[in-house]
């Protein structure tokens, strides 16, 4: 089994939640979103982000406005809608429940942050 693929799937699963959380704080341009996601150690490229933003817009969770740019084409700034805020609240509840469940299940796995707690002892 490919661990990189599993880790990528885990990150993709929470990407909508992270994007909505960021846009909830303030409207954002795509490069702003990418920068903020990178700060949180979620490396995302535009090719991944644009289809997701389109899906969220089509679902009426996001809207956008155009703003003229002095250094190039107009920019699309995304903002969260009321429907998006309600969806974000549901995702937050689900995240907290899931996080609590995973922490409960994995609490007895000792680790000090430097060794793999799941590696078999030889």
Image: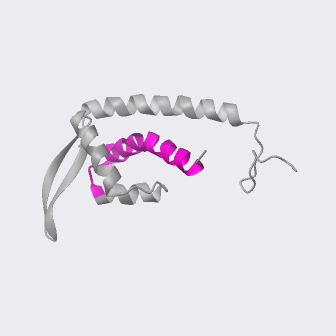
The percent coordinates of residue 27 (x first, y second) are 26, 49
Taking the spot 75% from the left edge, 52% from the top edge, the residue there is 112
Coloring basis for residues: one colour
Task: Using residue 63 as the reference point, say whether residue 93 is left or right of it.
Answer: right
Residue 82 placement: quadrant: top left
Main SS category, magenta section? helix
Task: Using residue 21 as the reference point, say whether residue 97 is left or right of it.
Answer: right
Between residue 119 and residue 113, name the one nearer to us. 119
Outermost residue on the right side: it is 122
Relative vertical location of residue 57 with respect to residue 69 in this rendering, above or below: above
Task: Using residue 31 as the reference point, say whether residue 92 is left or right of it.
Answer: right
The percent coordinates of residue 72 (x first, y second) are 15, 68
Taking the spot 68% from the left edge, 31% from the top edge, the residue there is 105
Between residue 85 and residue 19, name the one nearer to us. 19
Task: Using residue 115 as the reference point, say whether residue 101 is left or right of it.
Answer: left
Relative vertical location of residue 20 with respect to residue 45 in this rendering, above or below: above
Viewport quadrant of the N terminus: top right
**Residue 6 colored in magenta in the image:** yes
The percent coordinates of residue 90 (x first, y second) are 40, 28
Please give the range of residues in magenta: 3-30
Taking the spot 50% from the left edge, 34% from the top edge, the residue there is 95
Outermost residue on the front side: it is 1
The percent coordinates of residue 84 (x first, y second) are 29, 34
Residue 77 visible (yes or no): yes
């Amino acid at each position: 089994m490919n661990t990189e693929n599993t880790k990528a799937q885990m990150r993709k699963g929470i990407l909508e939640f992270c994007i909505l959380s960021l846009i909830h704080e303030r409207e954002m341009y795509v490069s702003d979103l990418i920068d903020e996601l990178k700060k949180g150690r979620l490396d995302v490229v535009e090719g991944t982000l644009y289809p997701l933003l389109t899906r969220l817009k089509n679902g009426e969770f996001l809207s956008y406005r155009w703003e003229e740019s002095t250094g190039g084409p107009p920019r699309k700034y995304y903002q969260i809608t009321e429907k998006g805020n309600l969806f974000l609240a549901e995702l937050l509840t689900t995240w907290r429940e899931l996080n609590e469940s995973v922490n409960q299940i994995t609490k007895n796995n000792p680790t000090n942050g430097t060794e793999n707690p799941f590696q078999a002892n030889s």
